[in-house]
Amino acid sequence: MMEPQFDDLQDAPLTRGDDIVLSVKGVSKKFCRSLKQSLFYGLQDIGAELIGSRQQQRTLRPNEFWALQNVSLTLRRGEAVGLVGANGSGKTTLLRMISGLIKPDSGTIRVRGRVAPLIALGAGFSPILTGRENIYANMSILGLSTAEIDARFDQVVEFAEIGEAIDAPVQSYSSGMAARLGFACAIHTDPDILLIDEVLAVGDARFRSKCERRLSELLQQGTSFVLVSHFFQGILNICQTGIYLAQGRLMASGSARDIMDQYEQDLFSVKRERAAFPFLLPPKSPQDSAGADLVSIYFKDAVGRLMEVPVSGEPVYICVRCKALRPLNALSLFVAIYQPAKDNSLALHMSSAYDQETFAVSPGEYELRVFLPHLGLLPGSYTLNVYLKEGSLYVLDAYESLRFSVKGHEKLNRGQYYQPREWQITPK
Amino acid sequence: MSNRYPESEVIYTPESRLRHPWQLIRAMGRDLLAARELAWRLMVRDISSQYRQSFLGIFWAFVPPIVAAAGLTLASNADILNIGETDLPYPVYVLFSMSLWQTFVESLNGPVQAVIAAKPMLARINFPREAIILSQLGQVGFNFAIKLLLIVSVFLWFKIPVAATVILAPVALLHLVALGTAVGLLLAPLGALYEDVPRGLTLVVSAWLFITPVIYPPPQTGLFSYLVRLNPVSPLLVTTRELATTGVLSAPVGFWLASGLAIVGLGASWLLYRIAMPFVIERISA
């Protein structure tokens, strides 16, 4: 098992013993797949704890599995670490052990200072009570005294942008308002360690960037962060270091960017092998055909040579070879490109039909293509869906989730897309 | 930045916390102190949201003992029910005893229900677990204060003489609440895991009422009287009632035995609650 090495970071604070706020050493946790058995094991554990016989647990009982196995990490004051990994890789379990909600089955966790979980926003909110009353209840649960809440009250209301509604019951709030209020409460508790689990998706974009600004302020003031996210940019913006978990094991740790790159690569290798281009589709029998069939899918460069890996910013043709079995009045091509690394979000969608470009064809084989003078996709891995349609609705043939990757001349996977550009300077 | 606890370091290990009893007891004491303010907030939150959603409000605290007293008095007057002699007029006897019994039941059900209601919060935030119990006790106290209004008005109406020992009655009442809380706290972690507990508790409570001298005076002979005397609630409830009214105690030994049981039991239950909660939380959350 790899030990995390943060020392290769230039901007990490100097190693001073008393700067470490969180130290997780060889921590494991097991969970049970069956609820009934899980409850029974719970009773067993309580019994063992009561007779004082509970020790380091190394073995699994029937139906149990390691939700987290031998994970270690160290966090210093003012440092932010990003946890990545697929669902079920143990990220939340780790956060819950750090916040002291559940006990590790082996290993040790040392925490120095106040831990605030940004896991449950608005925990303990009562819909009947007003925003004002709920702020007091919620921040109290997060560990503040009444005097401390009084001192922060105005800041919280201002941050949450609740305004006049502060004296209205929370059940009359929109979901965005309630979430903002919860976030504002949690972030104003002045913690030493902030545990953030996928909560940055709160509110609209403007509020999100406000949250990120507040987080970076806290970071500069010396708060340490453990951030869990599927959203890569969020981690890259805030964290210097990253930890990659898979099936409860620590796969790698190091600089956030390297970890992200590795995670992104692994995200694909477990799914499907990279396709070879041109990608040939199995032939269809005529009775299965809807009138035209896809034969192959491939990319070509500006001069028409086949290419395996398109290059960011360069001209590219996305080509589809197809066979029309009957005359078609309005053959059209839909192309959709998704990014699995960003929650499988749609990166690009193009349709010849929407561009008022449809083709009347007689039976025969054709190469239907779309020319992109500058490929706008950033280097990374993508999946491609193509739909051959008659008009804009009638699907003749389709192929989905064809994996491909885009490379770049330089490492430029920041931002959203490739912008063709020229740099200029003129004396004035 | 908050350097309020510069030296405080918390260590989580799989080792049983009972191996370091002194640390455990100190942590319990610290959390109990830390929980006061939160408990107050939670109590205010629960009581105000409860009454804000109710048109009749505290009326609901009065109704059950009044209905019970009225029904039983009618039945007794019609000779359907043969109660025997009570040292107070029967309606007052039932109303007062019923209020005490309900306070006991509330303190018994309280911890179980509070832990079940707070599940989502417990699963996500590490706050002093004592807070929800203290808040529940506060609510028991609040509800009793309302019932006290009713009791005082009925005492005035029936012109019941009150002995000087009435100032000691709250002590006995506290022991009664301690007994209820001890049992409730013992069952609370289990109740969060298994639904059988709250269900079974409802059944047990209704049976328990019949072996407690609430609607009848303590029987003196027979197997049944033996059963009633074994019931630790009986001496606590009877003593509270006697201290407030006649001042003559019928079961002082039983009272001290039951009180000892309540206090020791409360400490033990608290320890168990404390030890068991992390394991319960591990199992209740998704």
Image: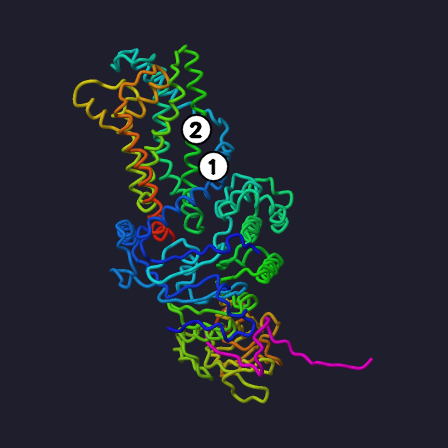
Secondary structure of the residue carrying tag 1 is helix
Please report the bounds of the magenta region as a residue range: A399-428
As drawn, A220 above or below A185: below
As drawn, A125 above or below A284: above
Q: Is residue B157 left or right of residue A237?
A: left
Q: For mark 1, what is the residue?
A: B43
Quarter of the image for the C terminus of chain A: give it: bottom right
Whether A101 is among the magenta residues is no
Mark 2 to mark 1: distance in Å?
Answer: 12 Å
The residue at 35%/26% (across/down) is B172
Which three-letter amino acid code belongs to the residue tagged 2?
Asn
Q: Is residue A378 left or right of residue A71?
A: right
Can residue A384 be seen at all in this image of the molecule? no
For this rendering, which residue is in front, B206 or A225?
Answer: A225
For this rendering, which residue is in front, B167 or B160?
Answer: B167
Decide: few, some or many residues near mark 1? Use Cα within 10 Å; few <14, some 14-19, many ≥20: many
